[in-house]
Every structure is written in C-alpha cells, then in structure tokens.
Amino acid sequence: MKKNRVQIPIGPIHPALKEPIQIEVELKGEHVENVSITLGHVHRGIEWIGLRRNPVQTLALAERVCGICNIVHPLAFCTAIENAANIKVPERAEYLRVIYAELERIHSHLLFLGVAAHELGFDSILHYTWLVREKVLDVIEYLTGNRITKAILMIGGVRRDITEKQMPKVREALEYYEKVYKKLCDVFLDDPTINARTRDIGVLTKKQALQLCAVGPTARASGIKKDIRQDFPYAAYADLDVEAITPDVLLNEIRGDTFDRVVVRVLEIKQSLELIDRCLKEMPDGPILYEPMLQRLLVQLRQVAGEGVALVEAPRGELIHYIRMEKSEAPLAWKIRAPTYANLSSIVPMLEGCELADVPIVVASIDPCIACANRAIIADKNAVLDQEKLHALSVNKTRALLKGGSK
Amino acid sequence: MNAEKFIGNLKKELADLVSDFRVVTTEHGISNRKAYRVWADTSAENFKNVVKKLFKIQPYPHFSVSSGFDAGSTIEILLHFALNYAKPHNLVLFTLRVKLPKENPKMETITDLIPGALIAEKEKREFLGIEIEGLPAGHMFLDESLAGVFPWRRDEKGANKIAKNLHKGEPIEKE
C-alpha cells in the first residue's frame, strides 16, 4: 500500500448470500483509489450437497440459495432439468411461473428501494417502501402459503394453480400498486436530495459494463438493452414481448450512475405489474404439471443422460443454472451463477473516485445479495469503523445537503 | 440478426476449432417460440482461439460463467456465453466444452479478453484444482487453510474427508 493511504475492509459476512463478500477500499483522503474483493467467507456448498440428492430433493435446496430470489432459483433449476430431460412444461404452468417471478421482482425491487433510502439516511422512506412491500408479500403468502420460501415450483410445472376465487385478491394488489406507484416515483425520482446523493455517483460506463459482463438493472442502467425475459424465450415470456428498460426511457439520457440504477428498478416495478395483469388475462386453461405423480417423475429423471442449461432474469439480472445427469439418482454436476456474482466486478470501477461516505449507497446500488456491509476496520489506525459509523458518514452527507452545505 | 442466421455464422467461424457442434431448441409459451442452445467441444489448445473468434462475430460476447466438474478421467470445463443478446427472442446460449486431463489440468486465462471472467476462473481453480495460466494468484472463495482440497473433485483431492469431520468442529485434516 502506498504512503498516505488508508485501507478499509468492508464486510464480509451475511448469510443471505451464496457468496458473501469483503470489499477492501484504499483511500486517499476521503476518496477511494483502489478496490479489491474477497468472497466465500461462509460458502455453504449448496451445489456439493445437491450432487448427493435426487432432483426433487435438490429443488428445495435451489430455493434456499437466496432468501429473496426463491422463485427464480428453483425456476432456473427446473428449467435446466427440463432441458436435460426433454420435458415440456404445460402452457398454464408457464404463465403461472411468470406471475410468481414478477411478484418476486416487485418485492425485491421494493426491498432495494428501502435499503437505498436507508443508506441515504431517509428512514421514513425506508419504512414507507417496506410498508408498501407488505402488500406483495401478503399476495405471495396468499397464493403459495409462504412469504419467503414459497415451495411452489416443481420440475415440469408448478405445484398449485391460481384459482378464479383467488384472482380478486391479486387484482386488488395490482390496483393498490397502481395507486401508490406515482408516490414511489415522486419520492425516488423527483427528490432533489436523493438526486444530489446519487447523480453522477458510482458511474459504470457502457464499455465497462460490457467488459465486466454486468447483468440485469446494473447493465441496463449503463445503457445495455439486455434482459433475459426479452432476449431468450423461457416460460410465458416467450409470448409477452418484454422490452428491456434503460434510463433514457424516462430521462432521455444514460449516465450509468447510481441514480440510473434506481430509475431502472422503479420503472421495472410498473413493468412487472403490467406483466402480471397480462398473464392473468391471457393465461390458458389446462394442466399445471407435466407429471403429477412424483415417483413416476423420479423414475423418468433417473433414466436421463444429458445436460441442460437455463437462463432466467432474476430481479438482479441474468441467473444461470447448469445440470448434468448421468442415469443416476443425483446429478453429476450442478452449477449456479447468481447475478450478484456477475455484478461484483462492476463495483470496482463504480467505487473508484467516490468518497467514503458514498460507498454504502454505491455498493447497495447493484442490489447485492449481501444485505449489509457489516463491519469495517481502519487497519493502520487501530480504530474501528463499524457498520453504524460507515452508515452515519453517508447519513451526515445527506444532512449536510439538506442544510444547504456543500456536496 | 436472427438466432438461426447467427448460429450459421458461428458454425462457419468455428468450423476448424470445434467438434460436435449441436443446436438444441426448446419451445415456450402459446406461441411456441424457440430458445436456442448451442453446444460445442474444443481442446485446451484451441479454446482460447474459439473465444477470440467470438469477438469477430460480436464486439462484446457476454460470458455468463464457466461450469466445471470431475468426469472421472478428465475434468470438464464448460464456458457459457450469452450471444446475440439485446435482440428480442434471438439470444443464443452457447456452451463450449473443454476436457482437461486429470493428471495435468491446465488452461489459459481469458481475463485478458474478458475481464469479467476473473471470478469464474478463480472459482474453477479453487474448487477443481485446475491451473489457469495468466490468472493472478490469490484465493477468492475458499480459505487458505483449504489449499490442496478441491471440493468439486470426486477423487482423493475432494472434500469427502473434511465433510465427514465437520460435525466435530475440529481443525481441517488433510491427507
């Protein structure tokens, strides 16, 4: 480390993430000069465990990769198995999968917006956003039986239908979000202080995003129009003609900064509401499972020799699962790559040049599955800068702006 | 460019470098729209040239991740690329397979071409014990105390023994 530099390790551990992370920033004064990343502090070995169980048992593991994205992980896992075993999912089940996945996207994006507000010091907005989020969690619970681990997907379809009797409650939730959406836009897109704290902060250029293989809202905020729902037919997205959302839709420009990443997610909430509405209207009748008899399905899967790969658009971006089956009870290979894994490298150019007080909001802006940068230590001063103090730095910067202080 | 035309170009460009070029399609939705998955095999000597060729077809080929597993006498590495992206319904999911001999599993890094491949390559090195030439040193996932244990290997270098000791809460024992 060069002289007059301070090295600050932020992180590493939060059990919500498959690959927990430690971000070490090297500061010159208040500005970040270098960033390095370490992962795997509590690697759980989910793939390893999955190679010792049959695919139906492993489905429960896939659901536990992430506490937030527990529709898209089993969806990607099932799609990879279906690809390997040449299983055709019934059309109604494909629509149901989209409804569940989009409900999950709404709750995930609202979760992100609350975290972003908290990192900026607006806890009233955090509480408002998460209050709004309760509605979608209630609907998920109503439809699946659980708020978080939903256990609704199955290889070859879904486990439970949405009945006509259940429809009004889903529609009521859509109407509720139509009503509060304008307020969400006002709060996050028109507030001068949020703008001041996020505009031109944590910039990721389009070229950097392409080189670093960024995915999801992180890539789209930098102007790359890639969205797996748009690009790669899977589930009922094949029928829905999703359009990848970039910030220029609203702002007529793309800067690739923290604000743009907020904009993309706010707009995608609206997009998800429209997709759910369309699915409810256009969903065909019919079966919801390829093979309702579990034992028969397992016998068929034991005969499979082949491999499958699935791409799914998770709330944080492209998610990929690879499966190799060799006519045995358990798969020979299973690889999961969650979107945060792909987006981590992008944190480095985003942070370089930022002030220390901007680190929490910039890291949060890729919506990492690491729910918190839980500790930080200034190594060469023997002083401790814990999560609260780092957060306080960010809050104080916002307060200074509100009082009309310099940025 | 639509997916079928793109796959035609891909096949033509890679003709001398890959074998077993396969196109697998699945149909989705009421519209029965096709999703295209392309699989191909190549050698450890040729695989980097294949990646270079991808740049001829697309300015920034999107590297999704690499998978890897112990296939007995070889270690198979699969590089997954999402190509022809940002074209509605026409993405081509290309998987390139490289089989490395168990006794000397070695391949070149592609991080000079695709910086975003860094984490995936470090993961393969730590979990499968393959040597990746040109990749910076340093662990990213596993603790240094696990050096020499490669959890995804199915042979004596795998994690079976330490997995059995985990419940004891004792320090990791290696062969």
Image: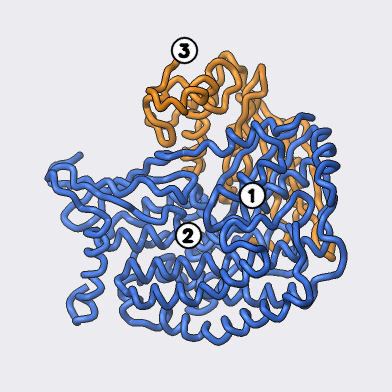
Do tag 3 and tag 1 residues touch (Cβ < 8 Å)? no
Reading the image, the residue beneath label 3 is B175
Which of the 4 image quarters holds residue A200? bottom left
Q: Quadrant of the C terminus of chain A?
A: bottom left
Of B33 and A86, which appears nearest the observer? A86
Local SS, label 2:
helix
Disc marking residue A206: 2
| Spot occupied by residue A272 in the image (x, y as percentages of width and height) | 62, 72
Q: Is residue A301 left or right of residue A385?
A: right
**Residue occupying the point 19% across, 81% down:** A403
Q: Are marks 3 and 1 on the same chain?
A: yes
Judging from the image, what is the letter of the chain drawn in orange?
B
Local SS, label 1:
strand
Residue A134 visible in rendering = yes
Which of the 4 image quarters holds residue B41? top right
Mark 2 chain = A
Mark 1 chain = B
Q: Does A127 appear above or below A159?
A: below
Q: CA distance from mark 2 to mark 3?
A: 48 Å
